[in-house]
Structure formats: C-alpha cells, structure tokens
Image (cartoon, rainbow, N blue to C red):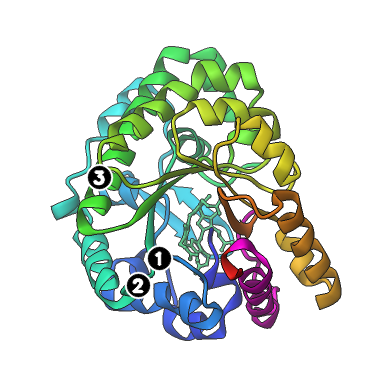
Amino acid sequence: MRQAGRSLPEYHRVRGEGSILDAIADPERSIEITLQPVRRYGVDAAILYSDIVVPVAAIGFGVDVTPGVGPTVEQPFSERADLDRLRRLDPDTDTPYVLETIRGLVEELGDTPLIGFAGAPFTVASYLIEGAPSRTYGKTKAMLHGEPALFAALLDRLADLAIDSLVSQIEAGVSAVQLFDSWAGALSPDVYEAAVLPSTQKVFEAVASYGVPRIHFGVGTGELLSLMSDAGADVIGVDWHVPIDVARERVRGKPVQGNLDPAVCLARWEVVAERTRDVLARIGGEPGHVFNLGHGVTPDIDPSILEKIVELVHTEGRAGR
Ligand code: CP3
C-alpha cells in the first residue's frame, strides 16, 4: 500500500519537495524510505518504494503524481493513435534506478523479504483515460463499453508493461510481487470477467515460471474475489468490505492478505486491538494468512498505533506461537 508517505515523520524528512517520481528516481532516497517502516514497525516484509505509474511515466506518456491528488496525465488516452505512445519497457534504460534500489535493498534487508509490484492493466488504464483520479470512472467505462477493441488493446499494452517491469524486479531480487488492481471494484463481475480478467491473467501467467509468490489486490472487490482468484495469483489481498473468513471462502481457500480497515487505526487502542483480534480469530490460527491493513495508511494515523498492531499480531497471531 502507499504507507510510508502517510504516517512517518522520518518519511517527510527524507521525501523532499516535488514529485514523488523524483524521489523514486533517486535510489539512495528510495532505499532509505523503503527501510523506514521495517525499522519502525518491525513488519515481516518491505514494500518497494515506487509507484504504479512509474513504467508509463518512464516511457514518456506524460504522467506525474500530483501531491495530495494522485496520478495526473497531460494528454489522456482517448483514441487508437494513443496506443503508439505506449511502447514496451526497457527496464535497464527506462527504470535503471528501480533496479538499483532493489539491488541495494536486497543487500540491506538480509532475511526480510522485499515485495515488488506493478499496477494492474485496468487500474493504470483508468488513470491514463481519466487523466486524474476519478470517483465514477465515466470515461474509462465509456471506452470499455463503447470501444471494446480499443480498450482491450490498451489493457494488453499495459499488461506487457507490467510484465516487463515485474520480470525486471524479480531478476533484480524481489522475493514476491504484488499486482495492484486498486480500482477494479468499480466494475460488476460480468464486466470484469469479459473486459479485465484476460489482461490480468496474462500478467500472472507471464511471471509464473519465476517461482516467486504473486499477490493480487483491489479495493471493494467483494463480488469479484472469486474471479480475481481465477486470474492466477497465489495470494489474494482483500480490503475490509468482506470479513476475511468469508473472503477466504470466496477465493476457494487460497492464502489471503488483509484486512483491518485502516480507518479503525484512528480509534483508541482498545478498539484497534479488538478489531485486530477479530481478524486473527476469523483465521483461527490456520496457515495461509498474511495480516495486513485492507488498504493504505492514511496520513492522520498515529505511527505508535501501527507499532502496537504489529506487536499484537506477532504475539497473538500464528507466527508468534
Ligand atoms: O508504502 C509505500 O510507500 C509503498 C510504495 C507505493 C507507493 N504507491 C508510493 C506512494 C505503492 C505500493 C504505491 C502503489 C499505488 N500508487 C497504488 C496501488 C495501491 C493502492 O494504494 O491502492 C495506487 C492506486 C497508486 C497511485 C497513487 N500514488 C495515488 C492514488 C497516490 C496518492 C496521492 C496523495 O498524495 O494522496 C499516490 C502517491 C503516493 N505514492 C504516495 C506514496 C507514498 C503518497 C505520498 C507522497 O506523494 O509522498
């Protein structure tokens, strides 16, 4: 999730002004920022400091991440000719800083696994088409339904970009990969299955042979969980809309990651502890659960609450016994 930037004072000290893409392009800063939550919270894995728009930005599509807003695009994707603006990624020349960051991190982290990631085709497409974060995904859905062949071609290109990026991250040393389809929950299951699933399946298939665990996550995906499970990941990330035990049934017993509501972290500790224990109880000590928040940390969350959650999960979760 987009965590560090949101909660840690030490992040704000190192992050610097301007676009997050500049911080990401600086391996020294990115290594330090990636390590901060591991140091502070003692979590079991690190997530690479990068962003889902890094590959599209690196091939020159004209994408930036506006602080406080999210990804914005100078000239949004609107017609077939725009496909020519989406070439494949050459990680060694387009995103060498990402690979340098990963190599540095693998050395620093020792036994702590590093999770690499990419944006899933649909979620990245939604930014390219809308031009900015959207609540309704109106333009995206208009293209999906109105120009299905163009939409499919766009998602296929974005699948290739995700594959190029993930393979390069795996080769540089990440221990697991996560594909973020954060906004897939905007779609109904039939539409998701017809218009989105094929490109997502392509990504998971392409990285299967590398043997690293593959995680798939989206927000508001309760009705999509079983289809998302079909997309091929080894682990399914779930947000808080569906209890984790119900989610696990929907993904037919696949390992699940989640799912404490981040907003719960704003309550007093007793309440947070109770909700955390509820997630653990629903899993009942069985294997195949990665405890996590259901989405990213918001900037108003007190880091000391997160420290306590990690401690509670370590002592009372299965790993603690
Ligand atoms: O915890 C981490 O810092 C991991 C690195 C990470 C970032 N983005 C850095 C970031 C990860 C895994 C992402 C993925 C990402 N980026 C997703 C998928 C995961 C999710 O949260 O659903 C999405 C949808 C994006 C696009 C994006 N980038 C948005 C919507 C925003 C928020 C804009 C804002 O300021 O509210 C960003 C910016 C961003 N990416 C931040 C961080 C730490 C916010 C703080 C900053 O700009 O420094």
In the rendered image, which residue does mark 3 sit on?
167
Alpha carbons under labels 1 and 2: distance apart: 6 Å
Closest to the observer, 186 or 295: 295
Mark 1 CB lies closer than 8 A to ligand 1: yes
Q: Where is the N terminus found, in terms of image quarters? A: bottom right
- Give how far across and how far down residue 23 sits, in percent: 36, 71
Alpha carbons under labels 2 and 3: distance apart: 20 Å
In the rendered image, which residue does mark 2 sit on?
30
Any part of residue 216 in sight = yes
Contact, mark 1 vs mark 2 (Cβ under 8 Å): yes
Q: Kindly identify the amino acid type of the residue bearing the numbered disc 1.
A: Tyr
271 horizontally vs 145: left or right: right
At a point 65% along the width and 66% down the height, the residue shown is: 298
> Closer to the N terminus: mark 1 or mark 2?
2
Question: Which mark is in front, 2 or 3?
Answer: 3
Q: Kindly identify the amino acid type of the residue bearing the numbered disc 2.
A: Ser
In the image, is residue 221 above or below residue 46?
A: above
Label 2: element kind: helix
Closest to the observer, 255 or 98: 255
Asked where in the image residue 157 lies, by quadrant, the reply is top left
Contact, mark 2 vs mark 3 (Cβ under 8 Å): no
Any part of residue 16 in sight = no
In the rendered image, which residue does mark 1 sit on?
49
In the image, is residue 170 above or below residue 159?
A: below
Q: Is residue 302 magenta?
A: yes
- Give how far across and how far down residue 246 sits, in percent: 73, 37
Asked where in the image residue 251 lies, by quadrant, the reply is top right
Q: Kindly identify the amino acid type of the residue bearing the numbered disc 3.
A: Val
At a point 41% along the width and 76% down the height, the residue shown is: 35
Disc 3 crowd rating (10 Å Cα; few below 14, some 14-19, many 20+) is: some
The boundaries of the magenta stretch are: 294-318
> Closer to the N terminus: mark 2 or mark 3?
2
